[in-house]
Image (spheres, grey):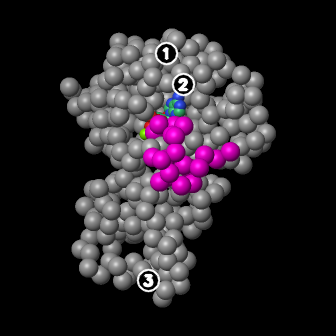
Amino acid sequence: MNTEFLKISGRADTPADDEILLRAADVIRRGGLVAIPTETVYGLAGSAFLAESAEKIYSAKGRPADNPLIVHIAYPEDAEKIAYTCDLYYRLAERFMPGPLTIILPKKDIIPDTVTAGLDSVGIRCPVHPAAHRLIEVSGHPIAAPSANRSGIPSPTNAEHVRADMDGRIDMILDGGECEIGLESTVIKLEADGSGCTILRPGAVTADMLSEVCPKVTISRAVIEPSLANEIKPESPGMKYKHYAPTAEVVLIDAPEEVFVNYVRMDAESIRRYGVLTPTETAGSFDGGVMLLLGPRGDAKEASRRLFTLLRRADEMELEKVYALLPPADGEYLAYYNRIVRAAGCKVIKLGNLF
Ligand code: TXA
Ligand code: MG
């Protein structure tokens, strides 16, 4: 298949963008697939009304058939057509939609079972990115869109990442530049009695932010201890798979920063090509290796924005190992924490003050 690659400004109100988005909407309505920028990561978009589109998505990604797709809508009230909403949904929507939040609701029959991998619930998200929003609006279909990567590897945060994974497999790639957030949306499920919600996948909408609206916010155990995801009954099937992993081995260290620096110096002696995920300020402390810069120390948003690009760069540069320091498992760092732990295959090396 010939994949069309088209640049857009990413602002919905330009006539040039609109012409392309109308064509992309046509591809979606006819059952084709288009990769689109969103504020989180690039999505692989197909009609959520067509089972054949979902089948094509699973096949293009090499995604296990039991991992459901998120359905994207233009406005929160569009959820009525596809799911059973509740008061808490609208309170959350008012505060966080459009934006990087996915809410799981009981699904209506109009959404084919293939889209939700046979589950009786559907994840709903309303993207704020103008091009994503406009595409959904003009296509007139809700849009099923997982991240536009081949299954298991880091999600794409620019169109070149998508091209590397999807060229020849889908109809169209829209290049709207770099994604602003860089990690996927927060996924939550609501308690049946409306008393609160549980975070199944952490993202830019944090537990503290959700607490402003939601009386009780629980963080699923598998978020903090991703290695549990295979053992406990996964509430969100995506949590149980190997994820976000580059080919390079990610070596994740739980230690004070000086200990980390010394460990890398020692361990990397025998390695030909390695990289270090590091805040900009610390980069000068390492003797060799490729510095994969996360931005200023303590800037969780910037580190999140860069993480997937840096993991992909490690593979582009054919690095054997990437060393990284374990971030805090809370607040704005929770999403970054969850992805890096999975990228490391859930293996964390804990070091005391050995040096
Ligand atoms: O930011 C995002 O959410 C991006 C952009 C493109 O919108 N999409 C994305 O989709 O990350 P995907 O398919 O890569 O991840 C969806 C996650 C998976 O972990 C899946 O298991 C979970 O959401 N999920 C989807 N529907 C679900 C459902 N009905 N119940 C439980 N988990 C669900
Ligand atoms: Mg994904």
For label 1, the crowd category at 10 Å Cα-Cα, with few meaning under 14, some 14 to 19 and many 20 or more, is many
**Vertical placement of 151 versus 98: above or below?**
below
**Vertical placement of 43 versus 245: above or below?**
above
Badge 2 residue CB within 8 Å of ligand 1: yes
In the figure, is residue 233 to the left or right of 347? Answer: right
* Quarter occupied by the N terminus: top left
Q: What residue type is labelled 2?
A: Val
> Answer yes or no: do the residues labelled 3 and 1 have beta carbons within 8 Å?
no
Mark 2 or 3 closer to N-term? 2
Q: Is residue 139 visible?
A: no
Numbered range of the magenta stretch: 218-238
- Between the residue at mark 3 and the residue at mark 1, the CA separation in whole angstroms equals 54 Å
In the figure, is residue 341 to the left or right of 207? Answer: left
Asked whether 65 falls inside the magenta stretch, the response is: no
Rendered image: mark on residue 111: 1
- Between the residue at mark 2 and the residue at mark 1, the CA separation in whole angstroms equals 8 Å
Location of mark 2 (residue): 122
Task: For mark 2, give the secondary structure.
Answer: strand
Location of mark 3 (residue): 262
**Vertical placement of 259 versus 122: above or below?**
below
Residue 24 on image: x %, y %: 38, 21
Q: Which of marks 3 and 1 is in front?
A: 1
Badge 3 residue CB within 8 Å of ligand 2: no
Q: What residue type is labelled 3?
A: Asn
